[in-house]
Image (spheres, coloured by chain):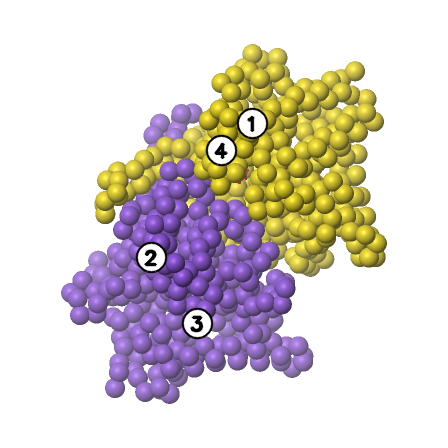
Chain colours: A purple, B yellow
Amino acid sequence: ARAYTIAVLAGDGIGVEVMPPALRCLEAAAKRFGFQMNFRHYDWGSCTYYNKHGTMVPSDWKELLQACDAIYFGAVGDPATVPDHISLWGSILLFRREFDQYINLRPCRLVPGVTSPLANREGRDIDFVTVRENTEGEYSSIGGRIFSGTERETVIQNTVFTRVGVDRVVRYAFELARSRPAKRLTSATKSNGISITMPYWDERVETIGKEYPDVKVDKYHIDILCAHFVQRPHIFDVVVGSNLLGDILSDLGPACTGTIGIAPSANLNPTAKREDPNWCPSLFEPVHGSAPDIAGKGIANPVGMIWAGQMMLEHLGEKEAANAMMLAIENVLKEGREAQLRGEGDLLTPDMLGNGTTEGL
Amino acid sequence: ARAYTIAVLAGDGIGVEVMPPALRCLEAAAKRFGFQMNFRHYDWGSCTYYNKHGTMVPSDWKELLQACDAIYFGAVGDPATVPDHISLWGSILLFRREFDQYINLRPCRLVPGVTSPLANREGRDIDFVTVRENTEGEYSSIGGRIFSGTERETVIQNTVFTRVGVDRVVRYAFELARSRPAKRLTSATKSNGISITMPYWDERVETIGKEYPDVKVDKYHIDILCAHFVQRPHIFDVVVGSNLLGDILSDLGPACTGTIGIAPSANLNPTAKREDPNWCPSLFEPVHGSAPDIAGKGIANPVGMIWAGQMMLEHLGEKEAANAMMLAIENVLKEGREAQLRGEGDLLTPDMLGNGTTEGL
Ligand SMILES: CC(C)[C@H](C(=O)O)[C@@H](O)C(=O)O
Ligand SMILES: CC(C)[C@H](C(=O)O)[C@@H](O)C(=O)O
């Protein structure tokens, strides 16, 4: 039988709470569709591993993860104990960079049962995908500080766009747009204000776009694009942007469709080969973070984590199981909402205006 | 009688359309409150001056503007003819930088008569101000390209934060928060991902915050902050951010309260002195741009331009006139909406779901 080895990194905060129900869903899918999921648990969180060892991961983290087919990641960070940039650069951002997971893919869809004040304006559905560059750009970690502690103190950080880095994500977005019915690509920049890096991105979109005459391309500045996400989210199909701009859009998108609590995310290295000695597994996580403010209350929405699992199944080639799982997510949310409206018990978590719990849902 | 000399730069696109009604409003206010407005018109737009001379402004632009008490600016840009970054860096962005207009202030308020799907959730009003750093940060213009045209092509741009630049905008935001009933300051960064410049901003907010124990400070990452703008805009009071982050928030905010068409913006140098030979006038403009897509149709909303004029009167010290003008704006919008609802003629412009015209409103 088909078998997959999955590295399970629950992490911190609500990561730890949403992981168990999500693993149960994956196990149920595996059972029903005749494959095996072997979970390897690693307690690499700020509150756990870092607390004991002073680093987020052990020195052999790379080999441990390379022994797996995919990484299933909750969330890390506990800002009260460890500064966020240490938790994150020692974990999720490290994995993205070292495994060259250059695509961050986030579907943004109005799922039945989810209510949003923006839903169905003009009677149309919201169904788009953000494609975010996930390894370079604004998250360069290059820069520094001079004249520290004086009035002349100056802090500089570089944004770095490479031809290879920009082209591969833009090309991926074009391919994705081509595969969808609307065949529409929206590219986000801020080339009127950020006058060196951003016009370069525009240039590459134009050049690569010539290979995709069947895809309709729109270029937007990020400020007005954010406004359009609120005012007419239904017009978007595939939206591509740099590391920072993609980050902003992929939180704003789910907020416009109702709740970040259900949004999933795939960090993909689409060209990596399992048999390669330098294999780079892809990573699947919810869009939300460790959310210290609601951690420990048992009220986190597990759907983002579960939906990320669904994306992982799809990536592993288990299409049937992935489809079934998507249907199950939609049904649970729809039934949850209907029960809520009928006043018959409330399974939905507070982010969906219910009073249910992580385990209940 | 009190008299003010105002440089009027209508610019391009809808800038040219919204300026005349706005000037009429200012003239009416001047007449009623007993002061004089002397308008000096300059046709410095992409379609006008640039078209003839190949530069956005004449070489003596600085002296011409320094002879004025304030600058009243429509919008520039005609991307079909001139690349945006040329129009903008030759005009509005040049003025901001050269006159050291380091504060970009944008009120975001749910005005009576304006409808928004996000309005009055939880029954509370939306009323906040964004304070954007307006001279440095991501808009540094420092950087370049190497290995052009090859696979190794790499493009780098620096984000620059200086102690002086960060401190003065953060301090301004704290003072503003202190002067408002809610006394709440929200600082936007992305210090978990952008690990050099953004943590520096956080550090300065913490340090300066010690001088303002009466102001409640929240730090948000820009991604989740954008989500909160959509999900609970009523919780914000004063929001401060860097050039890029502030730009995004100040378009998203008005989008959440209904329409960018009514949003105004002040580019301030709060410490400049009129009698100083190096006097730096402040600049007032609508948040919207030249909007080539709707230019020439006569349907642009003039309220953003008019409200910017209201901010200019306030800045010039004409408080009474400014208050009266604010009331007039609110009344027109409210009456416009009521008439629309009664089906009695429609003065509101299309961005407010009406079918009125610029001049009609
Ligand atoms: C036109 C553009 C350069 C400008 C900016 O980004 O500053 C505009 O979006 C604004 O907000 O005033
Ligand atoms: C936690 C943070 C560093 C991360 C990011 O900005 O990439 C998160 O916001 C995300 O979107 O995955």
Question: What is the total number of numbered labels drawn onto the structure image?
Answer: 4
- Given this view, does label 3 or label 1 mark the residue nearer the observer? 1
The residue that label 4 is drawn on is B87
| Same-subunit check for callouts 2 and 1 | no
- Give the letter of the chain under mark 2: A
- Cα separation, mark 3 vs mark 4, equals 45 Å
Q: Is residue A91 visible?
A: no
The residue that label 2 is drawn on is A211
Residue A24: image quadrant is bottom left
Q: Do the residues bearing badges 4 and 1 touch, measured as CB atoms within 8 Å?
A: no
- Give the letter of the chain under mark 1: B
Residue A148: image location, x then y, percent:
36, 30
- Give the letter of the chain under mark 3: A
Q: Is residue B240 visible?
A: yes
* Residue sitting at x 32%, y 35%: B144
The 10 Å Cα crowd at callout 4, few under 14, some 14 to 19, many 20 or more, is many
- Cα separation, mark 3 vs mark 2, equals 33 Å
The residue that label 1 is drawn on is B44
The 10 Å Cα crowd at callout 1, few under 14, some 14 to 19, many 20 or more, is many
| Same-subunit check for callouts 4 and 2 | no
Give the residue type that dot 3 points to.
Trp
- Cα separation, mark 4 vs mark 1, equals 10 Å
Give the residue type that dot 1 points to.
Trp
Q: Do the residues bearing badges 3 and 2 touch, measured as CB atoms within 8 Å?
A: no
